[in-house]
Amino acid sequence: MADTESRTKRSRQAASVLLLLCVGAIGSETVRYSVPEEMESGSFVANVAKDVGLEPRSLSARRARLVSDAASRHFQLNGKTGDLLIKEKLDREELCGQTEPCLVRFELVLENPLQSYLAEVRVTDINDHSPVFSENEFTIQILEATPPGARFPLEKAEDLDVGNNSLQNYSLNTNSYFSLYSRVRNNGMKYAELILDKALDREEQSKMNLLFTAVDGGSPPRSGTAQIRVIVLDINDNLPVFSQASYKALVPENSPRNYLVVTVSAADLDEGSNGEISYSFSRKSKESSKEFDINAVSGEIRVTGELDFEMRDTYELDVQATDGGGLYSHTKVLVEVVDVNDNAPEVTLTSLISPIPEDAPPETVVALLSVRDRDSGDNGRAACSIEDALPFSLKATFRDSYALVTERALDRESVSEYNITIVARDQGAPSLSAEQRIRVRVSDINDNAPVFSQAAYTMHVRENTAPGTAIGTVRAADADAEHNARVTYSLVPAGAGAGALPVLAYVAVNSADGSVYALRSLDYEQTRQLEVGVRATDAGSPALSSEAVLRVVVLDENDNAPFVLHPLQNSTAAWSELVPRSAEPGYLVTKVVAVDADAGQNAWLSYQLLRATEPGLFAVALHSGEVRTSRPLTERDTVKHRLIVLVRDSGESPLSSSATLNILLVDGFSDAYLQSADAAAAAAAEGADTGALTMYLTVSLCLVSFLFLLSVVTFVLLKVCRRRGGGEQYTSAPGTLYGDGNLPRDWVDVSGTGTLSRSYRYEVCLSTGSGSSEFRFLRPLVPAPPQQGGCVVTGSGKERDLLTDSHAPTDLEGADQVSVEWALPPFILYE
């Protein structure tokens, strides 16, 4: 109870002790404080911000912190006030043991900019431990013949406190035979010796019990006691005597086990068992002798444990020599441990800024670090360096402290991360070193524009493709990172598309992945190619961009069936082609002319005779569409023939159209038409009633036929006028209307497929006695002399031009023969 009250009182006194403040130059000197141990958690130590010349409100903004294992465990910094407070109760004995002074060192580190201050807190001792003996009872055997004045070393007491609070004195209870003598060793440790004041008499008193007390210097003082049991032995009048009063030896700290330190020897003048000597360590050197062993017979002291100069540099051993009669004597052995360079430097990273921007200026502080070596002398002097050729360097800030700074500008696109190896090397022989690896990442700034993989992209899309179909992808890469490398795509208008719609109405690009889609179905016949600009923009600030050209080529699909230009499928003529019965095999009857709006293979046309009145009489050329006779005509051949010609393109899914030809076999050109008209009228008369209904039908048919012919003639005239611009005038000349040299050169194949490969010459004959000068018959020109009384018109044609009687010059009425060359397919003219 009294002890508890005493401790409480001392704690209150310690809390009221003024803190010792020793403030050096900020940034270069160490700020020193002093605080007693056992102070409660939360106790105020000092205002660090004020001592180092900082504003307390700047501590939080600059992320002030304490850097030290011991300091962070026992102290805490108030970031608002700058007060240094005790985090948990301090125990000086746990922190420092017997080391005095007991110092806790730390650094006050601030950021923005990086700055540090060295500080240390000295923890002062209070008397909170009592002296303690290793055992509660000790036994000492003493010969009865031992003369007065003999000294017997006693076990020392241990007190964890230091200074005045440590062990100060020993005392012995009052008795008739012994007194106590206290001494101080070279290392400052106090021990006591038991002195025999009066000769012993075993027969009078063989055993004695003494009370041994150890007292410290605290206020109030603390004490510890032990019992000393003295046993008086029978006489043995000679003690062992050592050859030296003390021994001294030097041992390297890296000495192996069983290394011989020193050999002690003692002699005893007694004989027999009383003269046999054994060696041992005394109890008072029990702690010091853990790393050593002594041979009881030879007195050799050898190393049995690991020696570490940094932990302990001297050992004081107390060797006891005991003879067979139980008499013993003591000597001291002082072992000094010699330091060797067995500790590599230790590099501690205090603070690190990572990542750093790639545009950071030179001399930017990246990290703070410190180095220490546990060895002494040159073995403990270490220096730091960077081994690799990197854009960083080390600058010394304080003793054994360095700052890692940049040497030049950084480029994240070249190197995005640095693994910096800092090597600390001491000056020992051989030299030892240690490495500290620091990983520094470089953060990106938006200094690179996106780059397309191609300057121009060409993509193909088939016509009639459904809207939303993907037709390709554009790609752009950005050398930057994260959001600065996030690329979005957009189209840049470059002109109009098909018709009045802009190009952007036909194609679109996915802003995220660069996929290009068709927005509308394209028609090859209207639009062959689209061109638009595509832009890649990154997400940096400010944003950077680049552009490329996107060409979309439309591929043709077979979506147009052939269109028959000749013969006209809506013609009102009963029979469109006349063939004389005298025609030879291979006689050119007519030519089927068709065009296809598609291109390439889809526009290659082929012709095939699908159906005929008499199958073996006529044949159709596969590629030109010419209809020719296959054999000579006979009287048994039917006069009227109907041919159906199939026109088919060459697409993957071929499309086709059909043309119907009506052919009439005639004996002569002049009577053919009249015979055909008479035959038609006779057939109509045979099938009709003789009543009024026949008249009405006949009148209606004539009226409709007249209107239809008028419409056809008007249509053909308009077409001819449009193609010739309305400005061409036909002229006639004796014998020739158009010669080879007068044929217009600007008439071309509108289909572009070349289905009309050559021009044709035809004969047009006029009746010699006709007063109307109308055309009667048309047939190809063959190498035979012209017939007597006939006239010839030759011509070559284009698909859409048809020759009608309106084209015939009025001055042909009296001509015997006129040659006309016309760019027309095969055709038939009627009177």
Image (cartoon, grey):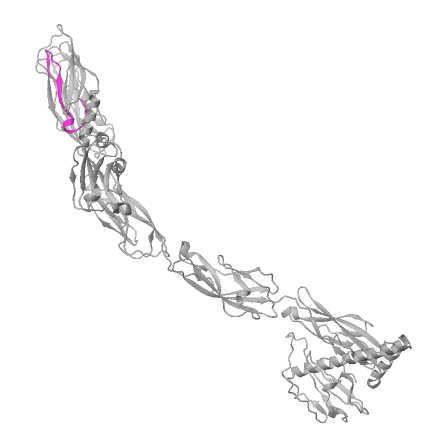
Residue 668 appears at what percent x and percent y? Answer: 83, 84
Vertical comparison of 722 with 768: above or below? above
Q: Is residue 27 magenta?
A: no
Q: Nearer the viewer, residue 259 or 620?
A: 620
Quadrant of image for the N terminus: top left
Range of the magenta residues?
Answer: 157-179
Vertical comparison of 363 with 313: above or below? below
Quadrant of image for the C terminus: bottom right
Residue 457 appears at what percent x and percent y? Answer: 50, 65
Residue 162 at least partly seen: yes
Instruction: Give the residue displayed 20% in from the left and 23% down from the top.
Output: 5
Vertical comparison of 247 with 66: above or below? above
The image quadrant that residue 252 belongs to is top left
Q: Is residue 165 magenta?
A: yes
The image quadrant that residue 269 belongs to is top left
Is 390 left, or right, of 639 in this rendering?
A: left
